[in-house]
């Protein structure tokens, strides 16, 4: 099953606003704070700005990573991509 992972920082006001918006829309996701992540992994994902939205599988393998967007990625776009990826599995 595919799920949403948000890469964020606790000190990022854009991340906080995006997470609050997702919560109001009852979007299910997990977060990964950059302070808890391996910097080599973040580098391999090319994380330079946050928040970053990833679609991951049950093993937490990244199936898709959206490019950074100042306002975050809309839940509709995320769900569409999950559906598209799910059809290919």
Image (tube, rainbow, N blue to C red):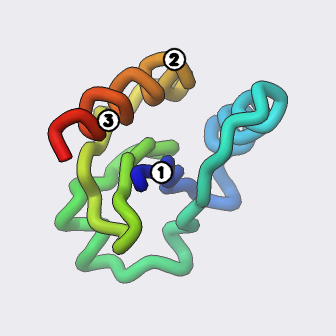
Q: Residue at x 61, y 50 (%)?
A: 29
| Residue 29 higher or lower than 43, as above or below | above
Percent of width and height locating residue 47: 32, 54
Q: What is the quadrant of residue 40 in the picture?
A: bottom left
Judge by depth and name the residue closer to the eye, 46 or 54: 54
Q: Secondary structure at mark 2?
A: helix
Q: Residue at x 49, y 48 (%)?
A: 4
Numbered circle sitting on residue 76: 2
Quick one: label 2, few (<14), some, or many (20+) residues within 10 Å? Answer: few
Q: CA distance from mark 3 to mark 1?
A: 13 Å
Q: Secondary structure at mark 3?
A: loop
Task: Please state, as top left, top right, bottom left or bottom right, where the N terminus lies in the image.
Answer: bottom left
Quick one: label 3, few (<14), some, or many (20+) residues within 10 Å? Answer: some
Residue for badge 3: 66
Q: Residue at x 37, y 35 (%)?
A: 82
Percent of width and height locating residue 58: 40, 67
Nearest-to-viewer mark from 3 and 1: 1
Q: Earlier in the sequence, mark 1 or mark 2?
A: 1
Q: Earlier in the sequence, mark 3 or mark 1?
A: 1
Q: What is the quadrant of residue 36 in the picture?
A: bottom right
Q: CA distance from mark 1 to mark 2?
A: 14 Å
| Residue 37 higher or lower than 61, as above or below | below
Percent of width and height locating residue 85: 25, 37
Judge by depth and name the residue closer to the eye, 47 or 88: 88
Percent of width and height locating residue 33: 57, 67
Residue for badge 1: 3
Q: Are marks 3 and 2 in contact (CB under 8 Å)?
A: no
Q: Earlier in the sequence, mark 3 or mark 2?
A: 3
């Amino acid at each position: 099953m595919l799920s949403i992972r948000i890469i964020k920082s606790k000190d990022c006001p854009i991340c906080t606003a995006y997470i609050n918006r997702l919560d109001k829309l009852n979007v299910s996701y997990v977060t990964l704070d950059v302070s808890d992540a391996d910097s080599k992994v973040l580098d391999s994902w090319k994380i330079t700005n946050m928040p970053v939205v990833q679609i991951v599988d049950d093993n937490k393998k990244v199936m898709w990573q959206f490019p950074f967007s100042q306002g975050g990625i809309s839940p509709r776009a995320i769900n569409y991509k999950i559906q598209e990826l799910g059809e290919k599995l």
